[in-house]
Image: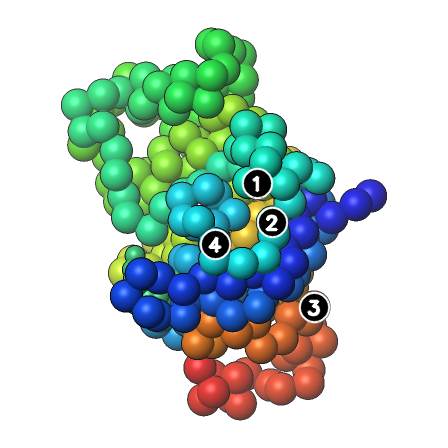
Amino acid sequence: MPPIIEIDHLSKQYAGGTRALDNVSLSIEQGEILALLGPNGAGKTTLISIICGLVVPTGGTVRVGGHDIRTDWRAARKLIGLVPQEIALEPFETVANSVRFTRGLYGEGPDEAYLEQLLRSLALWDKRDAPTRALSGGMKRRVLIAKALSHRPKVLFLDEPTAGVDVHLRREMWTVVSELRASGVTIILTTHYLEEAEEMADRIGVIDKGHLMLVRPTAELMGEFGRKQLTVEL
Ligand code: ATP
């Protein structure tokens, strides 16, 4: 099977002059979980934002499911779901309506059977009629995932899914991601935590100052460098 995402010589220089990405090339296989690991300002969000069509690159190409995001954006967009770093929900809307709303934004008609399956898989079914503002932090994050999966994308991006959350919630997210893996969706997540990348990902890409330093299978990377050395370098 061809890679679901092909990134070729991608660069981004922001208007202020910051070179956030420099000549990044990367292929992502269908069904894999890839963690992008790197410190603050490394370029992780910029990379995800370009693939998701939120930031325009200054050079290079991105293909999603074979579709060039510049020339064939409509087709590429349907294959992508994004869980942004910030929690942004409609506070007075119910969980179910919030997910329906996002599905509509993708131009998809209602699919109540899929909605039920999705909410059940994320342990949100019992909360479907609750306003999102009444939910715990962990549930809010799960609603964001449900919204991102509402149009059945093939690739899910999670931008720092556990930033600023406690250890309990971090572990809860790890469980949610490992359950999503079983559904066959490809997952790309960004994180500052080596432990998290090691726990969840099949492959880890280390990104720093806009450069993709290396990409390796998780076990190989841990074997080669060891946790201590990688943590120090981050
Ligand atoms: P973090 O882990 O803190 O979210 P990151 O690895 O996601 O960081 P980016 O947010 O992609 O990194 O930022 C990469 C660089 O680009 C940083 O130097 C940042 O200040 C800069 N940058 C990001 N967004 C913009 C923007 N809209 N305009 C100008 N510079 C930006």
Q: Depth check: give the residue in front, 208 or 72.
A: 72
Residue type, label 2: Val
Few, some or many residues within 10 Å of mark 2 (<14, 14–19, 20+): many
Is residue 86 left or right of 232 when viewed as pictured? left
Mark 2: C-beta under 8 Å from nearest atom of ligand 1:
no
Few, some or many residues within 10 Å of mark 4 (<14, 14–19, 20+): many
The answer to the question of whether label 3 and label 1 lie on touching residues, with beta carbons closer than 8 A, is no
Screen quadrant of the C terminus: bottom left
Screen quadrant of the N terminus: top right
Give the spatial CA distance, label 2 vs label 4: 9 Å
- Please give the residue where the numbered disc 2 appears in the rendered image: 62
- Indicate which disc, 3 or 1, sits on the residue closer to the N terminus: 1
The answer to the question of whether label 2 and label 4 lie on touching residues, with beta carbons closer than 8 A, is yes
Give the spatial CA distance, label 1 vs label 2: 6 Å
- Please give the residue where the numbered disc 4 appears in the rendered image: 57
Give the spatial CA distance, label 3 vs label 1: 27 Å
Q: Depth-wise, is mark 3 or mark 2 nearer the camera?
A: 2
Mark 3: C-beta under 8 Å from nearest atom of ligand 1:
no
Is residue 163 left or right of 104 when viewed as pictured? left
Q: Depth-wise, is mark 2 or mark 4 nearer the camera?
A: 4
The answer to the question of whether label 1 and label 4 lie on touching residues, with beta carbons closer than 8 A, is no
Give the spatial CA distance, label 3 vs label 2: 22 Å
Secondary structure at badge 1 equals loop
Few, some or many residues within 10 Å of mark 1 (<14, 14–19, 20+): many
- Please give the residue where the numbered disc 1 appears in the rendered image: 69
- Indicate which disc, 2 or 4, sits on the residue closer to the N terminus: 4
Q: Which mark is residue 217?
A: 3
Q: Depth check: give the residue in front, 64 or 220.
A: 64
- Indicate which disc, 4 or 3, sits on the residue closer to the N terminus: 4
Residue 159: x %, y % from top left: 41, 53
